[in-house]
């Protein structure tokens, strides 16, 4: 059942709503980590195939999460304003939008995948394996996006625990299915993709059953559904900039993958492992950021702007502190952690260097994530887009290229370029939070 986030102590409410999100994101990250772990046991080439597929997979996740954030923000503001029926209608429109967007992604992605892999320098068996992996995930894109939005509806009403349970049980199913389909059924990288796809379908069934059981505040009744473009406009006014924010990260990831590809297959494999581990480390920041979408949304809807700002500032400090703990672990045990995924010496060497440099950015990323979440929750998504673009494309990619290629620092130049992007984006975030209004006039 949902929760009123407009009352109670700031720190208490923040911790209570954030920890389920952190756990949920941790469990979500195991989808990619499990694939990397089991596929890495096949060969470095198989691991590289999954690694170069990640930018396209991240694009699907980015768009689904973007629409989901739009739904969370709109539902939270309606619930904060005590407009139950409008929250129900917004949820129904969000599911409809997710399904049709998923269909488009499925068709467009399957057609574009060969060309995109060519751009990344993939050929021969590497390209074949990458296509085997990504095409299955693309085929399931509509159901994947529906599962994202279903969880987002629950977050909008303040229910963080149920999405955590959904992701937990889906992650366990994925971990069970991975070795069964990859090794026992002999499907290789296709088995990894099927395990992920089946687990996402299970997550969708779980969410829909929960909502229809009457335990959620939001009620779905498509029998009396009446399309109203105003709901789509509200969702997309947050969802599109949020999705573009995520896509900017995907584009940045794609460009960084091209730069890393200059240094060979082992470098790509190490980058794939390092990026997945980095995704694990930033979970506290991401979890708090998504929790802030609900918290800030409900408080803005209730007219409590200063309370929303207070949440944001405290969340930034808390996120950076927890992320820095991961950074210390990565720095101290970088080779050992990398070797879990692949035993080839160059992969371990490259991955260890990434894990020792990237954590420097964790000191400031918590602040970036918190301010981004606050802008999304208040409906000021274009500002969140500006922050993410500055981090991923405007600063990180050019810095990585210059340091790695032009100045001859090699792969370490890529890692330092990413850190540069993070420090630049925190300056952009703080300036916007200081001078821009948090609340948006509808």
Image (tube, rainbow, N blue to C red):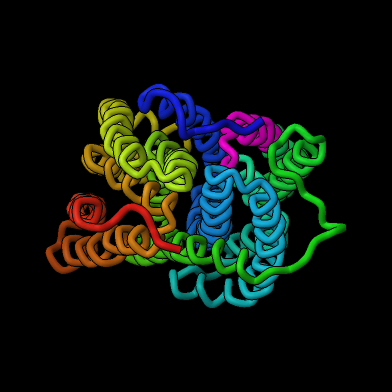
Q: Is residue 18 magenta?
A: no
Tell me what residue is drawn at x 79 percent, y 35 percent.
214
Image quarter of residue 414:
bottom left
Give residue 349's position: percent from left, percent from top: 30, 41
Is there any visible trace of residue 29 in the rendered image? yes
Identity of the residue furthest to the left in this view = 407
Quadrant for the N terminus, please.
top right
> Which residue is at the front of the view, 33 or 293?
293
> Which residue is at the front of the view, 337 or 237?
237
Question: Is residue 373 rendered to the left or right of residue 356?
Answer: right
Image quarter of residue 336:
top left
Give residue 215's position: percent from left, percent from top: 75, 32
Tell me what residue is drawn at x 73 percent, y 45 percent.
204
Is there any visible trace of residue 188 in the rendered image? no
**Magenta stretch, residue numbers:** 155-175
Q: Is residue 166 magenta?
A: yes
Question: Is residue 318 rendered to the left or right of residue 73?
Answer: left
Give residue 31's position: percent from left, percent from top: 58, 41
Tell me what residue is drawn at x 62 percent, y 60 percent.
134
Question: Is residue 372 rendered to the left or right of residue 72?
Answer: left
Relative height, residue 209 to residue 232 (above, below): above
Identity of the residue furthest to the right in this view = 223
> Which residue is at the front of the view, 106 or 12?
12
Q: Mainly helix, strand or loop, the magenta region?
A: helix
């Amino acid at each position: 059942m949902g929760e009123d986030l407009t009352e109670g102590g700031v720190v208490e409410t923040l911790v209570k709503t954030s920890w389920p999100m952190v756990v949920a994101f941790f469990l979500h990250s195991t989808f990619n980590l499990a694939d990397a772990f089991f596929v890495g046991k096949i060969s470095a080439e198989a691991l590289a195939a999954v690694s170069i597929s990640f930018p396209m997979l991240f694009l699907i996740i980015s768009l689904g999460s973007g629409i989901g954030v739009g739904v969370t923000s709109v539902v939270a503001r309606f619930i904060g304003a005590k407009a139950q029926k409008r929250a129900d209608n917004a949820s129904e429109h969000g599911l409809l939008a997710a399904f049709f967007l998923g269909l488009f992604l499925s068709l467009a992605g399957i057609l574009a995948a060969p060309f995109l892999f060519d751009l990344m320098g993939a050929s021969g068996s590497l390209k074949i394996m990458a296509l085997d992996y990504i095409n299955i995930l693309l085929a399931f894109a509509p159901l994947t996006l529906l599962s994202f939005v279903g969880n987002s509806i629950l977050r909008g009403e303040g229910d963080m625990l149920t999405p955590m349970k959904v992701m937990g049980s889906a992650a366990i199913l994925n971990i069970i299915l991975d070795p069964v389909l990859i090794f026992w059924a002999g499907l290789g990288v296709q088995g990894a993709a099927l395990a992920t796809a089946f687990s996402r379908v299970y997550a969708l069934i779980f969410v829909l059953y929960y909502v229809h059981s009457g335990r959620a505040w939001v009620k779905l009744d498509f029998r009396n559904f009446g399309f109203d473009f105003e709901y789509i406009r509200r969702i997309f006014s947050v969802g599109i900039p949020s999705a573009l924010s995520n896509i900017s990260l995907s584009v940045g990831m794609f460009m960084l993958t091209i730069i890393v590809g200059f240094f060979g297959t082992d470098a790509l494999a190490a980058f794939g492992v390092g990026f997945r581990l980095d995704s694990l480390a930033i979970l506290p920041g991401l979890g708090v950021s998504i929790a802030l979408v609900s918290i800030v949304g409900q408080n803005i809807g209730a007219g409590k702007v200063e309370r929303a700002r207070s949440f944001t500032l405290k969340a930034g400090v808390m996120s950076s502190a927890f992320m820095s703990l991961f950074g210390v672990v990565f720095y101290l045990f970088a080779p050992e952690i990398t070797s879990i995924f692949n035993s080839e010496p160059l992969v371990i060497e490259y991955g260890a260097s990434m894990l020792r440099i990237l954590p420097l950015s964790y000191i400031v990323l918590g602040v970036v994530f918190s301010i981004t979440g606050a802008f999304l929750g208040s409906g000021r998504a274009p500002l969140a887009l500006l922050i993410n673009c500055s981090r991923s494309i405007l600063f990180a990619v050019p810095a990585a290229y210059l340091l790695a290629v032009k100045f001859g620092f090699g792969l370490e130049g890529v890692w330092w370029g990413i850190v540069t992007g993070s420090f630049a984006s925190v300056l952009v975030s703080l300036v916007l939070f200081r001078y821009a209004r948090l609340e948006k006039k509808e």
